[in-house]
């Protein structure tokens, strides 16, 4: 229980979630005997998203009985005021947790967010690879730091990969998957977009895709076939919101996603097939540098105010 929100009391919030299940890429079938992964993203623990919604996401994740939970960034909104709440939420997950940071985590203070996650029992991957063993099966988990703010380093992470062990990738920004597929990572889990939150009349594709320049807006893209140099990426709709909690349309619902890796046979019902990417627009070096400078400015501003009480 945290802040008066007991586990099991969030029925109305659970109804606002979509729980979607997908089969993993074919590449896992010869190397894994059914590993279940739950994917959460963009929790944004803070004032905008009620704690009931956070705990509902945890309940749904636990109910799936995953082998591990992957969370792909933006754990907080705009400050460090809710780090204790974040710790409480992550601590309730009853499976190993692997995490990467997002842009809001860097804006708010990456060291402090990392510390809160580690103290809650999560393993944070900053351009790193860890090996997870379940029922005698080894799986590499590659995690990239946030690409939006210029912290991702695919090459550094790639050097840690063992080509003889199956792998899965975590990245807050989905476009990093294009490079990870070339390293033999067949599935990448991502976030950042919140699926646009308002998804009627494909407004999410207009705002997140055409205007913001993302190739991957929400859901499954790429190929799950065993094609060299290709792979799949899944962009989750997220749990929380950073500014406006409004969510309209099926695609915009809060989301818990399950991937079944290495199953002999397909998941019978999936929400949608793999989609073609939008044209996308790669950020310029100048834009990435500007985003990185914002992180530094916010850090300096925090430090000028002294330590958080």
Image (cartoon, grey):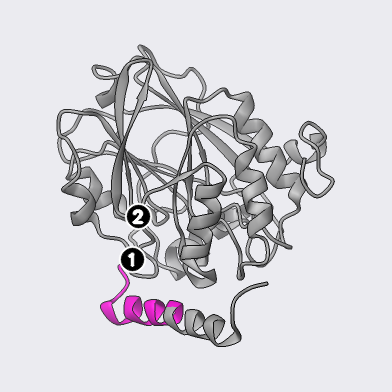
Callout 1 crowding tier (Cα within 10 Å): few <14, some 14–19, many ≥20: some
Q: Residue at x 46, y 60 (%)?
A: 102
What is the x, y in percent for residue 184? 19, 38
What is the x, y in percent for residue 301? 54, 85
What is the x, y in percent for residue 164? 15, 28
The chief SS type of the magenta part is helix
Q: Is residue 200 left or right of residue 219?
A: right
Residue 164 vertical placement versus 57 (above, below): above
Q: Is residue 257 left or right of residue 224?
A: right
Q: Is residue 180 visible?
A: yes
Q: Is residue 138 left or right of residue 253?
A: left
Magenta stretch: residue 166 in it?
no
Q: Which residues are magenta?
A: 281-295
Marker count (numbered): 2
- SS category of the residue bearing label 2: loop
Q: Residue at x 38, y 15 (%)?
A: 135
Q: Residue at x 59, y 30 (%)?
A: 94
What is the x, y in percent for residue 151? 33, 65
Q: Is residue 250 visible?
A: no
Q: Which residue is mark 1?
A: 151
């Amino acid at each position: 229980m945290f802040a008066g929100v007991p586990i099991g009391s969030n029925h109305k919030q659970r109804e606002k979630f979509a729980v979607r299940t997908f089969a993993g890429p074919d590449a896992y079938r010869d190397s894994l005997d059914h590993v279940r992964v739950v994917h959460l993203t963009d929790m944004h623990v803070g004032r905008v998203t009620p704690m009931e919604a956070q705990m509902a996401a945890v309940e749904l994740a636990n109910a799936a009985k995953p082998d591990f939970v992957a969370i792909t960034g933006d754990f907080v909104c705009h400050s460090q005021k809710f780090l204790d709440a974040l710790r409480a939420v992550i601590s309730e997950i009853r499976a190993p947790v692997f995490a990467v940071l997002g842009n809001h985590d860097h804006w708010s203070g990456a060291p402090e967010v990392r510390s809160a996650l580690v103290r809650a029992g999560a393993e944070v991957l900053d351009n790193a690879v860890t090996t997870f063993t379940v029922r005698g099966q080894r799986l590499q988990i590659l995690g990239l730091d946030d690409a939006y703010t210029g912290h991702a380093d695919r090459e550094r992470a790639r050097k840690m990969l063992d080509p003889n062990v199956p792998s899965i990738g975590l990245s807050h920004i989905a476009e990093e998957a294009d490079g990870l597929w070339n390293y033999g990572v067949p599935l990448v889990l991502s976030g950042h977009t919140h699926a646009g939150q308002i998804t009627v009349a494909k407004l999410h594709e207009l705002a997140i895709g055409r205007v913001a320049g993302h190739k991957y807006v929400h859901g499954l893209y790429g190929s799950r076939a065993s094609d060299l140099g290709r792979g799949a990426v899944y962009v989750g709709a997220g749990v929380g919101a950073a500014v406006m909690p409004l969510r309209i349309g099926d695609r915009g619902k809060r989301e818990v996603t399950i991937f079944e890796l290495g199953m002999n046979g397909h998941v019978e019902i999936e929400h949608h097939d793999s989609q073609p990417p939008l044209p996308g627009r790669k950020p310029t070096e100048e834009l990435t540098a500007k985003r990185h400078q914002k992180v530094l400015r916010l850090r300096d501003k925090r430090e000028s105010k002294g330590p958080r009480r």
